[in-house]
Amino acid sequence: METVAVFGGASPGFPSSLQRRRSCSSLPSAHHKPNLRAHHHHQLSAFPSSLHLFSYFPARPHARTLSKPRIFLPHLVASLEQVDETYIMVKPDGVQRGLVGEIISRFEKKGFKLTGLKLFQCPQDLAEEHYKDLKGKSFFPKLIDYIVSGPVVCMAWEGVGVVAAARKLIGATNPLQAEPGTIRGDLAVQTGRNVVHGSDSPENGKREIALWFKEGELCQWTPVQAPWLRE
């Protein structure tokens, strides 16, 4: 096997004294050291990571200028632990059929906290404000007549992910399409008599609770079972 000199591109074999001198002169001096870290970083930059979800670089000032935002793990965990509020209402058909206790128990067994509860005869203006997003629909007048036809049960519930979980507990708007085990899947057969209402977003949960409950009607308390529901 032929041996090639490392410096100076010399011919095979041992270099002459002149070649050795040239080779030594090509070495970097003590005052001119190559920036290996910069070279190494340049090489790695050709293969940028596409996953920045758990990246955190407190010692890198240029990290602020990166185009993709970083999400630090504790921030992600905190977002998953967000406590929300939702408004649940047993509609007039649910009250008339004696399903109030059954519906409340579904949420209690799930582990959510009840912070507001009242039997209430809804006036027409409140019903119209609650369903104002549906005002342009052909069924709007019929819907309002239905909601004011008898007492409803107003509830405010609190918990981690309570809005999304409540929607799953309630089931699809059309009870015939709702899964067995859901409130509508078990207790209703028609969209116009689907027993219960639930907020569709955390923002609407807060808005509807403020709409249906007056100041002082909500109770803030700590259930004794709380340590057994969440770590």
Image: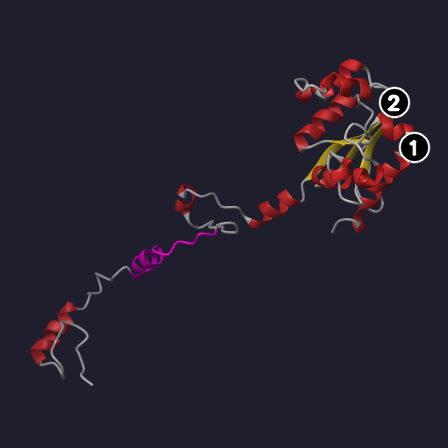
Q: Amino acid at mark 1?
A: Gly
Which span of residues is magenta-colored? 36-51
Q: Is residue 171 visible?
A: no
> Residue beneath label 1, please?
98
- Residue 139 drawn above or below residue 34: above
Secondary structure category for the residue under label 1: loop
Secondary structure category for the residue under label 2: loop
Quadrant of the frame with the N terminus: bottom left
Seen from the viewer's position, the closer of residues 2 and 92 is 92
> Residue beneath label 2, please?
151
Question: Which percent across, then down, holds residue 68?
Answer: 44, 43
Seen at 70% across and 25% down, the residue is 207
Question: Which percent across, then down, holds residue 17?
Answer: 9, 80
Q: Residue furthest bottom?
A: 1
Seen from the viewer's position, the closer of residues 151 and 31 is 151
Position of residue 63 in the picture relative to residue 166 (left or right): left
Seen at 74% across and 34% down, the residue is 174
N-term mark: 1 or 2: 1
Seen from the viewer's position, the closer of residues 68 and 200 is 200
